[in-house]
Structures are given as C-alpha cells and as structure tokens.
Amino acid sequence: MYKRPPTDTTTADTGASGERPFRIVAVTSCPTGIAHTYMAAESLENAGREAGVEVVVETQGSAGFTRLDPAVIAAADGVIFAHDVPVRDKDRFAGKPTVDVGVKAGINKPAELITEVRGKAARGEVSAGSAPGTPVERSGDSTEGYGTKLRKWLMSGVSYMVPFVAAGGLLIALGFAIGGYTVNKAPSVMDHFVWTQADSWGALLFQIGGVAFGFLVPVLAGYIAYGMADRPGLVPGFVGGAISLTINAGFLGGLAAGLIAGGVVIGIQKVKIPAALRGIMPVVVIPLISAAIVGFLMFVVIGKPIASAQKGMTDWLNGLTGTNAVLLGALLGLMMCFDLGGPVNKVAYTFATAGIAVASPSDSAMKIMAAVMAAGMVPPLAMALATTVRGKLFTQTERENGKAAWVLGASFISEGAIPFAAADPLRVIPSAMVGGAVTGSLSMAFGATLRAPHGGIFVVPLIGNPFLYLIAIAAGVCVTTALVVVLKGMRKQAPEGTGAGVADTAIAAKADSKEPVAA
C-alpha cells in the first residue's frame, strides 16, 4: 500500500507568516485499486507541497485502506475526491468545500483541483450533509449524469472482480504448465493426490483456480449492485450472478443481474414502511424480496435471451480467423493504449478476461488475452526506450520515470506511461496507439495464446508461441518509440526541470499491495 508521510495532527503547522496553512483531505480510488489510486495521491501531495497547502490522502486501494483520523477531517478546510468507483464512507466529509472528479484528474491536474477547492472555501460553498446509507448519494453525486453513474457502478464490480481473475487465471495457467494440457481432465484431488507427482500438484493448482473463477460472475454482479445500493445490494447481486452461471448467461448475465439487483433494492428502499418494520428491513425484508425478484427475472424473463447472446458472442470469437482476427487484435491494441488504464482500456481488458474465465477457454479467447496483454505492455516500454535512446528530448524527471517504466511495462502495468502522456498527450498517446495496434495485430497473426490474465514477461513460459509473441511486443515498442522521438524532435528540446513524474509510485504500490495489477 502507498505510504503517506506522517502528519502530526496534534499541533497546527504554521507557515512563514505564522498562519496555519490551508488543509485539504483527499480520497483517491480507481477500478483496480492500485496504480491510479496511488499515483493520484502522490500528485496531490506533491502539488500541495508546492502550493504551501497541507494535503492528507486516504487511498482506498484494493489492499484495503486506513480511514483518516476524524480529527484530521474535522480540521480540514476542503475535500478532494479523485475516484472512478464510489467513495467508501463518503458521509464523513459532508459539510466541507468539496471537489469531486475522476482519478485521472487527480493525476494530471492536481494544482488546478487545489485551486478550485480553495476557491470554494473562500466563497463558503460546502457539500450537503447526507443520511448514512442513502443509496443514491452513495452511488454518486446527484449532479452526475446517468452515464457517469453507470460507469462507476460497472467499475465498482470490475474492481472487486479483478483479483479473482488474476488469482484464478494464474493458478490455472500454472496448473497447465506443471501438469500438462490434459490437467483439466484429472480427477478431483480429493480422490487422487500423490505428493511426489508433479501431475497431482498441477491438478491441485488447476482445481483451486477453477474454484476462484467460479466466483467471477457472482462477485461482478454483487459489487455492481453494491455500488448502486450499498450493502443491501449484495445478496440479490450475488444470487443473480450465481443464477447467470447456472443458466449459462456468463459475463453478460452478470452485468445485467448486478444492474437489476441494484435497481430493485433502490426501488424497495423508496417505499414508505411502518416504523415497527424498519429494524428487519435490511436483514430480512430487502434480501428476501430483492433476491426473489432478481431470481425470477433471471430464470424466467431475461436469462434465456442473455444466454443466447453470450453463446453468439462465444461462437463469433471461436470463428475468428485470418484478417478478422488481425483486425480485432489491432482494435484491442488501440483500446489498450488509448487511455492507459482508463475506462476504454478496462473494456478491452475485461472483454479478454471474460473469455478465459472458464476452466477450458477456447483457442480464440486465449489469443485475444495474449494480444491484450502484449499491447498493454507497449506504452511504458516504449517510453522507457525513448528516454534511453534520446534522453535530451525529455526532462530529467521524465528520464527518471523512464527507468521505472521498464519495470512497469514488463509487468503489464500500462499506467507507467501516464506521466509522459499527461505531459505531452498529442504526441505520446497517438504514438502509443499505433504501436499497440501493431503489437495486437501481430500477436493475433502469430497465433500466440495466453491462459493467464496478467503477469507480463513473467508468464512468458505459459504463452503459446512465446518467441513470436516477444517479437510482436518488440515491434510495437519500436514503432511507438520511433514515432515519439520523431514527433518530439520536431519541436524544441525539452527544458530541464521537474515534470509530472509519479510512475515510480505505481511500483511502490504494487510492491506493497502484493497483488497483480490490471492494466
């Protein structure tokens, strides 16, 4: 987990003039809960130091989070929320000047956010108080559009699903690596396990991974509903997700079940009930009624059409060959490199992981996963190479970030290129997209396959056609590097100075969290 500098709350810090500095508390969070979360925290704290403002950040990451001391919140003059999933326990910050933005704004323009919250404080603008547990307020600001709220709800589900994808996928891939490609036909290790046989250990890993994968759709549905309606949404969400697996509606069914469950719970909570019944509502009435409604809809009304759509998509993927496969690889590469860990990137990654989230994924699904991971590695590796071969085109801070980007890129953490894209988006992002498209299309053309949803170069032994796969990555990296160098070379040499360098924070976050990071 990201480590914040210790803040002494027992005494008020004073500036050169003897006055207490402006104090801001912030919360950062992103769908995966690792890279963007901690990079935004670092940017806000750096900008605060430069502006003479005291900034204390609560990072609501996937490794858990430590709540800010209530005394720190009470003493704060303003609040910044930089998040792509709902802020947990948001009511703690009510009644203070508040700026509410996406996590990328916390990375790219922290100084502007600090200026904005100070302006609100000067004008006396404060956020309204809210009653604990109100689902609409927990799911997003009432001024947000429905599209923004929907994205946050979906990202809430994806953020909780990703660790299951990583753990289950890597265990299954290791099972195949140790036990061979017939390990999926091995008997249950409950019935047959020999301590000295590699096949038994491979079967054990495979079967544990299969159990982890069994939670993917219920967790996705449950936490989409949680993002909409808080804890009352968990029961119908999990039930709907489990039914989706039962009727073979898969990933699409899980999305529908989560949204339906959240909507049903919100509807129930709006019904006025006698005071005598309020005590049993959250533990009896809401779970009972919502689970029954969601179950009915999934089994009887919408389950079969969604299952048919899921089967159609699977059949389409299995039928991809030749030019179609290459074009799909190029499209996925473009998406992976467009926003470097943002919503478009997550759509491509989730599409790929949904295809391999079964015990025996199709060959096409494994090719898609390989193409997505390869393309996601291109931007940070290319930026690292560019700062190495033409360092004069970059600031000193960017050159330091380039060293970190080698590790980030090799680990399949696309966010390693964010500092470069934030500083020069018109040159870096198009260049990265071209390289990503080249790598994605070549990976598909070479027929590279991947059973693991993450790992970067560390899972190369688990990749089908690994040599050609590395060539595809190298080609994309070279293309992006060449474009960046040419485009930057067309302007004046970059001045020495400090940049928006926070890529190294992602390394620290990954090391502390001890969890894989989705690109």
Image: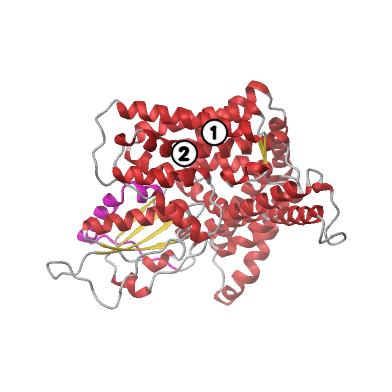
Q: Position of residue 266 (x, y in %)?
A: 55, 58
Q: Position of residue 293 (x, y in %)?
A: 68, 56
Looking at the image, residue 23 lies above or below residue 305: below
Q: Position of residue 462 (x, y in %)?
A: 67, 43
Looking at the image, residue 293 lies above or below residue 369: below
Q: On the rendered structure, is 369 left or right of 333? A: right
The chief SS type of the magenta part is helix
Residue drawn where x is 27% and y is 58% of the image: 48
Q: Secondary structure at mark 1?
A: helix
The boundaries of the magenta stretch are 103-131
Q: On the rendered structure, is 482 left or right of 179? A: left
Q: To which quarter of the image does residue 207 belong?
A: bottom right
Cβ atoms under marks 1 and 2 closer than 8 Å: yes
Q: Which residue is mark 2?
A: 381
For label 2, count other residues whose C-alpha is less than 10 Å away and answer few (under 14), some (14-19) or many (20+): many
Residue drawn where x is 50% and y is 58% of the image: 511
Q: Secondary structure at mark 2?
A: helix
Disc 2 marks a residue whose amino acid type is Leu
